[in-house]
Amino acid sequence: MKIIAVEPFLLHVPVSGDAIADGSHAIRYWGAPGVRIRTDEGRVGTGYTGTHAHLPTDRAIAQVIRDGYGPLLLGQDPREVRALWQRLHRASPIQWVGRAGLTHLALAAVDIALWDLKAQAAGEPLWRLLGGAADDHLEAYDTDGGWLDRSDRELVDETRARMDQGYRAVKIKVGSDDPARDLRRVAAVREVLPAGARLMVDANGAWDLARALEVGRQLLAYDVAWLEEPIWYDDLPGHAKLARTLTTPIALGEQLYTIDAFRDFVAADAVHYVQADAVRLAGITEWWAVADLAHAHHKPVVPHIGDMMQVHLHLAWAHPACALLEHIPWMRACFVEPATVRDGAFVRPERPGAGTALRDDALETYGVRV
Protein backbone atom coordinates (compact mmCIF):
# COMPACT_ATOMS: atom_id res chain seq x y z
CA MET A 1 0.00 0.00 0.00
CA LYS A 2 1.41 3.39 -1.05
CA ILE A 3 0.36 6.98 -0.50
CA ILE A 4 -0.66 8.70 -3.74
CA ALA A 5 -2.22 11.97 -2.53
CA VAL A 6 -2.15 14.28 0.51
CA GLU A 7 -5.18 16.59 0.52
CA PRO A 8 -5.61 19.24 3.24
CA PHE A 9 -9.04 20.58 4.22
CA LEU A 10 -10.46 23.06 6.70
CA LEU A 11 -13.70 22.93 8.68
CA HIS A 12 -15.22 25.73 10.76
CA VAL A 13 -18.04 24.30 12.88
CA PRO A 14 -20.42 26.41 15.03
CA VAL A 15 -20.17 25.94 18.79
CA SER A 16 -23.25 25.44 20.98
CA GLY A 17 -25.48 28.50 21.12
CA ASP A 18 -24.27 31.68 19.46
CA ALA A 19 -20.89 31.56 21.20
CA ILE A 20 -19.07 30.18 24.23
CA ALA A 21 -16.60 31.73 26.67
CA ASP A 22 -14.15 30.52 29.29
CA GLY A 23 -11.66 32.35 31.47
CA SER A 24 -9.38 33.22 28.55
CA HIS A 25 -11.30 32.92 25.27
CA ALA A 26 -14.60 33.57 23.54
CA ILE A 27 -15.31 31.79 20.25
CA ARG A 28 -18.16 31.17 17.81
CA TYR A 29 -16.60 28.42 15.71
CA TRP A 30 -14.32 25.44 16.25
CA GLY A 31 -11.66 25.03 13.59
CA ALA A 32 -10.48 21.68 12.23
CA PRO A 33 -7.62 21.98 9.75
CA GLY A 34 -7.11 18.44 8.51
CA VAL A 35 -5.97 16.08 5.80
CA ARG A 36 -7.18 13.19 3.73
CA ILE A 37 -4.42 10.78 2.73
CA ARG A 38 -5.24 8.57 -0.26
CA THR A 39 -3.61 5.27 -1.13
CA ASP A 40 -3.21 3.22 -4.31
CA GLU A 41 -5.63 0.66 -2.82
CA GLY A 42 -8.46 3.18 -2.69
CA ARG A 43 -8.40 3.76 1.08
CA VAL A 44 -8.65 7.25 2.54
CA GLY A 45 -7.29 8.13 5.97
CA THR A 46 -8.58 11.26 7.70
CA GLY A 47 -6.93 13.31 10.43
CA TYR A 48 -7.20 16.82 11.79
CA THR A 49 -6.21 19.13 14.58
CA GLY A 50 -8.29 21.63 16.59
CA THR A 51 -8.18 25.44 16.68
CA HIS A 52 -10.26 28.50 17.51
CA ALA A 53 -11.15 28.91 13.82
CA HIS A 54 -8.62 31.61 12.96
CA LEU A 55 -8.33 31.64 9.18
CA PRO A 56 -4.70 32.81 8.76
CA THR A 57 -3.27 30.23 11.14
CA ASP A 58 -5.67 27.50 10.01
CA ARG A 59 -4.56 28.03 6.42
CA ALA A 60 -0.92 28.03 7.52
CA ILE A 61 -1.46 24.59 9.12
CA ALA A 62 -3.02 23.35 5.88
CA GLN A 63 -0.08 24.70 3.90
CA VAL A 64 2.42 22.88 6.14
CA ILE A 65 0.46 19.67 5.57
CA ARG A 66 0.37 20.10 1.80
CA ASP A 67 3.78 21.61 1.03
CA GLY A 68 5.85 20.56 4.05
CA TYR A 69 4.78 17.01 4.88
CA GLY A 70 3.04 16.03 1.64
CA PRO A 71 6.19 15.54 -0.47
CA LEU A 72 7.74 13.42 2.29
CA LEU A 73 4.70 11.11 2.37
CA LEU A 74 4.12 10.41 -1.32
CA GLY A 75 5.09 6.86 -2.25
CA GLN A 76 5.39 5.74 1.39
CA ASP A 77 3.56 2.85 3.04
CA PRO A 78 1.09 4.47 5.49
CA ARG A 79 1.13 1.43 7.77
CA GLU A 80 4.69 2.28 8.83
CA VAL A 81 3.29 5.01 11.06
CA ARG A 82 5.98 5.30 13.70
CA ALA A 83 8.81 5.39 11.16
CA LEU A 84 6.96 8.04 9.18
CA TRP A 85 6.35 10.04 12.36
CA GLN A 86 10.09 10.07 13.05
CA ARG A 87 10.82 11.11 9.47
CA LEU A 88 8.36 14.01 9.58
CA HIS A 89 9.17 15.09 13.13
CA ARG A 90 12.88 15.24 12.31
CA ALA A 91 12.49 16.88 8.89
CA SER A 92 15.12 19.58 9.28
CA PRO A 93 13.49 22.49 7.37
CA ILE A 94 10.24 22.06 9.33
CA GLN A 95 11.88 21.25 12.67
CA TRP A 96 13.94 24.42 12.37
CA VAL A 97 10.88 26.72 12.39
CA GLY A 98 8.95 25.09 15.23
CA ARG A 99 8.66 21.96 17.33
CA ALA A 100 5.48 22.87 19.23
CA GLY A 101 3.44 25.26 17.09
CA LEU A 102 1.78 25.19 13.68
CA THR A 103 4.08 22.48 12.37
CA HIS A 104 3.28 20.29 15.36
CA LEU A 105 -0.47 20.65 14.84
CA ALA A 106 -0.02 19.82 11.16
CA LEU A 107 1.93 16.69 12.11
CA ALA A 108 -0.88 15.71 14.50
CA ALA A 109 -3.38 15.75 11.62
CA VAL A 110 -1.08 13.68 9.40
CA ASP A 111 -0.28 11.14 12.10
CA ILE A 112 -3.96 10.63 12.95
CA ALA A 113 -4.76 10.05 9.27
CA LEU A 114 -1.97 7.46 9.06
CA TRP A 115 -3.28 5.58 12.10
CA ASP A 116 -6.75 5.73 10.57
CA LEU A 117 -5.37 4.04 7.45
CA LYS A 118 -3.47 1.46 9.50
CA ALA A 119 -6.62 0.47 11.40
CA GLN A 120 -8.64 0.34 8.19
CA ALA A 121 -6.05 -1.90 6.58
CA ALA A 122 -6.26 -4.23 9.60
CA GLY A 123 -10.06 -4.23 9.37
CA GLU A 124 -10.32 -3.13 13.02
CA PRO A 125 -11.46 -0.08 14.98
CA LEU A 126 -8.35 1.68 16.25
CA TRP A 127 -9.07 0.87 19.90
CA ARG A 128 -8.91 -2.85 19.13
CA LEU A 129 -5.75 -2.48 17.03
CA LEU A 130 -4.15 -0.76 20.03
CA GLY A 131 -5.14 -3.56 22.40
CA GLY A 132 -8.37 -2.35 23.99
CA ALA A 133 -11.01 -4.71 25.32
CA ALA A 134 -14.61 -4.81 24.10
CA ASP A 135 -16.05 -5.05 27.62
CA ASP A 136 -14.28 -1.93 28.94
CA HIS A 137 -16.37 0.95 30.34
CA LEU A 138 -15.55 4.57 29.50
CA GLU A 139 -17.36 7.18 31.60
CA ALA A 140 -18.23 10.56 30.06
CA TYR A 141 -18.14 13.93 31.75
CA ASP A 142 -19.85 16.94 30.21
CA THR A 143 -18.33 20.38 29.70
CA ASP A 144 -20.74 21.90 27.18
CA GLY A 145 -23.22 23.03 29.82
CA GLY A 146 -20.66 24.84 31.95
CA TRP A 147 -19.38 27.80 29.92
CA LEU A 148 -18.55 31.03 31.68
CA ASP A 149 -20.92 33.12 29.56
CA ARG A 150 -23.94 31.16 30.84
CA SER A 151 -25.97 32.77 33.60
CA ASP A 152 -26.16 31.09 36.99
CA ARG A 153 -29.68 29.89 36.17
CA GLU A 154 -28.61 28.49 32.79
CA LEU A 155 -25.68 26.77 34.45
CA VAL A 156 -27.90 25.07 37.03
CA ASP A 157 -30.50 24.11 34.42
CA GLU A 158 -27.82 22.59 32.17
CA THR A 159 -26.42 20.64 35.11
CA ARG A 160 -29.82 19.20 35.97
CA ALA A 161 -30.35 18.31 32.30
CA ARG A 162 -27.05 16.40 32.20
CA MET A 163 -27.98 14.45 35.31
CA ASP A 164 -31.33 13.57 33.72
CA GLN A 165 -29.40 12.29 30.68
CA GLY A 166 -27.41 9.91 32.87
CA TYR A 167 -24.16 11.81 33.43
CA ARG A 168 -22.51 11.57 36.81
CA ALA A 169 -19.70 14.05 36.17
CA VAL A 170 -19.69 17.65 34.87
CA LYS A 171 -17.11 20.39 34.47
CA ILE A 172 -17.80 24.12 34.70
CA LYS A 173 -15.66 27.09 33.79
CA VAL A 174 -14.24 29.51 36.33
CA GLY A 175 -11.75 32.35 35.87
CA SER A 176 -14.12 35.33 35.71
CA ASP A 177 -13.01 38.77 36.88
CA ASP A 178 -14.85 38.22 40.17
CA PRO A 179 -13.71 35.17 42.16
CA ALA A 180 -16.85 35.48 44.32
CA ARG A 181 -18.91 34.81 41.18
CA ASP A 182 -16.80 31.72 40.43
CA LEU A 183 -17.36 30.32 43.91
CA ARG A 184 -21.07 31.13 43.80
CA ARG A 185 -21.41 29.16 40.56
CA VAL A 186 -19.45 26.22 41.96
CA ALA A 187 -21.69 26.18 45.03
CA ALA A 188 -24.85 26.35 42.92
CA VAL A 189 -23.82 23.40 40.77
CA ARG A 190 -22.68 21.31 43.73
CA GLU A 191 -26.04 21.89 45.40
CA VAL A 192 -28.00 20.32 42.53
CA LEU A 193 -25.65 17.39 41.88
CA PRO A 194 -26.74 14.07 43.34
CA ALA A 195 -24.62 12.24 45.88
CA GLY A 196 -21.56 10.68 44.27
CA ALA A 197 -21.59 12.91 41.17
CA ARG A 198 -18.25 14.52 40.34
CA LEU A 199 -17.70 18.24 39.77
CA MET A 200 -14.58 19.61 38.05
CA VAL A 201 -13.65 23.27 37.48
CA ASP A 202 -11.47 24.80 34.76
CA ALA A 203 -9.87 28.27 34.84
CA ASN A 204 -8.23 28.01 31.40
CA GLY A 205 -5.07 29.67 32.70
CA ALA A 206 -6.88 32.87 33.70
CA TRP A 207 -5.57 33.29 37.26
CA ASP A 208 -2.24 34.34 38.66
CA LEU A 209 -0.68 32.22 41.38
CA ALA A 210 -2.03 34.31 44.26
CA ARG A 211 -5.63 34.07 43.06
CA ALA A 212 -5.28 30.37 42.31
CA LEU A 213 -4.12 29.79 45.87
CA GLU A 214 -6.92 31.95 47.29
CA VAL A 215 -9.76 30.39 45.30
CA GLY A 216 -8.23 26.93 45.26
CA ARG A 217 -8.29 26.69 49.06
CA GLN A 218 -12.01 27.52 49.06
CA LEU A 219 -12.83 24.81 46.52
CA LEU A 220 -12.25 22.20 49.22
CA ALA A 221 -15.69 23.03 50.65
CA TYR A 222 -17.37 21.89 47.42
CA ASP A 223 -15.65 18.52 46.93
CA VAL A 224 -14.18 19.50 43.55
CA ALA A 225 -12.56 16.53 41.78
CA TRP A 226 -9.91 18.67 40.09
CA LEU A 227 -8.86 22.25 39.37
CA GLU A 228 -7.86 22.52 35.72
CA GLU A 229 -5.30 24.94 34.27
CA PRO A 230 -5.47 27.35 37.20
CA ILE A 231 -2.57 29.53 35.98
CA TRP A 232 -0.53 30.22 32.85
CA TYR A 233 -0.05 26.93 31.00
CA ASP A 234 3.77 26.87 30.95
CA ASP A 235 4.31 27.92 34.58
CA LEU A 236 5.85 24.73 35.90
CA PRO A 237 7.04 26.11 39.27
CA GLY A 238 3.64 27.69 39.90
CA HIS A 239 1.72 24.49 39.18
CA ALA A 240 4.15 22.54 41.36
CA LYS A 241 3.49 24.93 44.25
CA LEU A 242 -0.27 24.61 43.78
CA ALA A 243 -0.03 20.83 43.69
CA ARG A 244 1.93 20.85 46.95
CA THR A 245 -0.29 23.41 48.68
CA LEU A 246 -3.87 22.67 47.67
CA THR A 247 -5.92 19.66 48.63
CA THR A 248 -7.83 19.76 45.35
CA PRO A 249 -5.91 17.88 42.61
CA ILE A 250 -4.47 19.75 39.61
CA ALA A 251 -5.36 18.80 36.03
CA LEU A 252 -3.63 20.13 32.92
CA GLY A 253 -2.27 19.18 29.53
CA GLU A 254 -4.33 20.62 26.69
CA GLN A 255 -1.75 23.41 26.25
CA LEU A 256 1.31 21.16 26.51
CA TYR A 257 2.50 20.28 23.04
CA THR A 258 5.42 17.85 23.50
CA ILE A 259 6.33 14.79 25.50
CA ASP A 260 9.24 16.82 26.91
CA ALA A 261 6.82 19.30 28.49
CA PHE A 262 4.74 16.49 30.01
CA ARG A 263 7.91 14.81 31.29
CA ASP A 264 8.88 17.95 33.18
CA PHE A 265 5.42 18.49 34.73
CA VAL A 266 5.15 14.84 35.76
CA ALA A 267 8.69 14.77 37.16
CA ALA A 268 7.97 17.89 39.24
CA ASP A 269 4.72 16.31 40.52
CA ALA A 270 2.96 19.45 39.25
CA VAL A 271 -0.03 17.57 37.81
CA HIS A 272 -2.38 14.89 39.13
CA TYR A 273 -4.68 14.36 36.10
CA VAL A 274 -2.84 14.31 32.75
CA GLN A 275 -4.99 15.78 29.96
CA ALA A 276 -2.96 14.82 26.93
CA ASP A 277 -4.43 15.91 23.58
CA ALA A 278 -3.55 14.02 20.39
CA VAL A 279 -4.28 17.06 18.22
CA ARG A 280 -1.96 19.35 20.23
CA LEU A 281 0.70 16.72 20.67
CA ALA A 282 2.01 15.43 17.34
CA GLY A 283 -0.79 12.92 16.90
CA ILE A 284 -1.54 9.48 18.25
CA THR A 285 2.11 8.42 18.20
CA GLU A 286 3.21 11.09 20.69
CA TRP A 287 -0.04 10.90 22.68
CA TRP A 288 0.54 7.21 23.39
CA ALA A 289 4.07 7.92 24.63
CA VAL A 290 2.72 10.60 27.00
CA ALA A 291 -0.01 8.26 28.25
CA ASP A 292 2.61 5.59 28.95
CA LEU A 293 4.70 8.17 30.81
CA ALA A 294 1.75 9.15 32.99
CA HIS A 295 0.79 5.53 33.58
CA ALA A 296 4.33 4.72 34.71
CA HIS A 297 3.93 7.42 37.38
CA HIS A 298 0.47 6.13 38.39
CA LYS A 299 -1.28 9.26 37.14
CA PRO A 300 -4.66 8.94 35.38
CA VAL A 301 -4.95 10.23 31.82
CA VAL A 302 -8.15 12.12 30.95
CA PRO A 303 -7.77 13.25 27.32
CA HIS A 304 -8.62 16.79 26.40
CA ILE A 305 -11.37 17.07 23.86
CA GLY A 306 -9.44 18.92 21.15
CA ASP A 307 -10.71 16.74 18.31
CA MET A 308 -14.24 16.53 19.73
CA MET A 309 -13.89 12.96 21.02
CA GLN A 310 -13.37 10.92 17.85
CA VAL A 311 -9.71 9.89 18.14
CA HIS A 312 -9.66 10.25 21.91
CA LEU A 313 -12.58 7.87 22.17
CA HIS A 314 -10.46 5.12 20.61
CA LEU A 315 -7.35 6.05 22.59
CA ALA A 316 -9.17 6.19 25.91
CA TRP A 317 -10.81 2.85 25.20
CA ALA A 318 -7.42 1.30 24.51
CA HIS A 319 -5.01 2.77 27.08
CA PRO A 320 -5.05 1.43 30.66
CA ALA A 321 -4.48 4.89 32.17
CA CYS A 322 -7.85 6.14 30.88
CA ALA A 323 -11.29 5.67 32.41
CA LEU A 324 -12.92 9.08 31.83
CA LEU A 325 -13.38 11.25 28.73
CA GLU A 326 -14.70 14.76 28.15
CA HIS A 327 -17.85 15.32 26.09
CA ILE A 328 -18.38 18.38 23.86
CA PRO A 329 -20.62 17.53 20.87
CA TRP A 330 -19.94 20.41 18.47
CA MET A 331 -18.62 18.26 15.61
CA ARG A 332 -21.08 15.36 15.79
CA ALA A 333 -22.67 16.26 12.45
CA CYS A 334 -19.30 15.93 10.69
CA PHE A 335 -18.62 12.24 11.26
CA VAL A 336 -19.85 8.96 9.83
CA GLU A 337 -19.69 7.38 13.30
CA PRO A 338 -19.82 10.24 15.82
CA ALA A 339 -18.88 9.69 19.45
CA THR A 340 -22.06 8.93 21.38
CA VAL A 341 -22.88 8.98 25.09
CA ARG A 342 -25.60 6.77 26.54
CA ASP A 343 -26.47 6.73 30.25
CA GLY A 344 -23.30 8.61 31.12
CA ALA A 345 -20.89 6.33 29.23
CA PHE A 346 -19.47 6.35 25.73
CA VAL A 347 -20.77 3.81 23.24
CA ARG A 348 -18.02 1.59 21.86
CA PRO A 349 -17.15 2.48 18.22
CA GLU A 350 -17.19 -0.44 15.79
CA ARG A 351 -16.18 0.80 12.33
CA PRO A 352 -12.62 0.03 11.14
CA GLY A 353 -10.37 3.07 11.48
CA ALA A 354 -9.88 5.88 13.96
CA GLY A 355 -13.46 7.20 13.87
CA THR A 356 -12.37 10.22 11.81
CA ALA A 357 -14.21 9.45 8.55
CA LEU A 358 -16.19 12.51 7.48
CA ARG A 359 -19.74 12.49 6.21
CA ASP A 360 -20.08 13.30 2.53
CA ASP A 361 -21.77 16.60 3.33
CA ALA A 362 -19.37 17.77 6.07
CA LEU A 363 -17.05 19.72 3.77
CA GLU A 364 -19.99 21.14 1.85
CA THR A 365 -21.65 22.34 5.06
CA TYR A 366 -18.66 23.45 7.16
CA GLY A 367 -15.74 23.59 4.73
CA VAL A 368 -13.65 26.73 4.28
CA ARG A 369 -11.37 27.32 1.30
CA VAL A 370 -7.79 26.28 2.13
Image: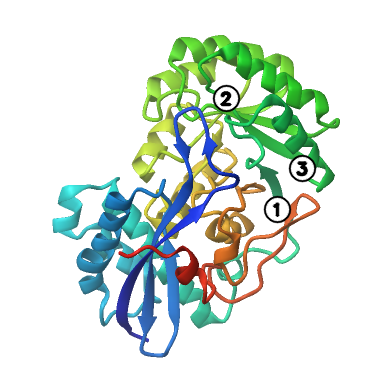
Report the front residue among 214 and 59. 59
Q: Which residue is mark 3?
A: 162
Q: How far from the left and from the top, in percent, is residue 157? A: 77, 34
Question: What residue is at 62 percent from the left and 48 percent from the top?
Answer: 322
Query: What amino acid type should be assigned to the residue bearing mark 1?
Result: Leu
Q: Which residue is mark 2?
A: 174
Q: Quadrant of the C terminus?
A: bottom left
Whichever of labels 3 and 2 marks the residue nearer the N terminus, that label is 3
Give the Cα separation between the discs numbered 1 and 2.
26 Å
Q: How far from the left and from the top, in percent, is residue 213? A: 53, 12
Give the Cα separation between the discs numbered 3 and 2.
19 Å
Q: Is residue 334 above or below residue 93?
A: below
Residue 357 showing in the rendered view: no
**Residue depth check, mark 1 versus mark 2: number of the one nearer the observer:** 2
Element marked by disc 3: helix
Label ID, residue 138? 1
Element marked by disc 1: loop
Relative side of 2 to 192, left or right: left
Query: What amino acid type should be assigned to the residue bearing mark 3?
Result: Arg
Asked which quadrant contains residue 231, the reply is top left
Q: How far from the left and from the top, in percent, is residue 316? A: 60, 54
**Residue depth check, mark 1 versus mark 3: number of the one nearer the observer:** 3
Whichever of labels 1 and 2 marks the residue nearer the N terminus, that label is 1
Q: Is residue 314 above or below residue 294?
A: below
Give the Cα separation between the discs numbered 1 and 3.
17 Å
Question: What residue is at 69 percent from the left and 22 percent from the top?
Answer: 186
Element marked by disc 2: loop
Q: Residues within 10 Å of mark 3 (few under 14, many from 20)?
A: many
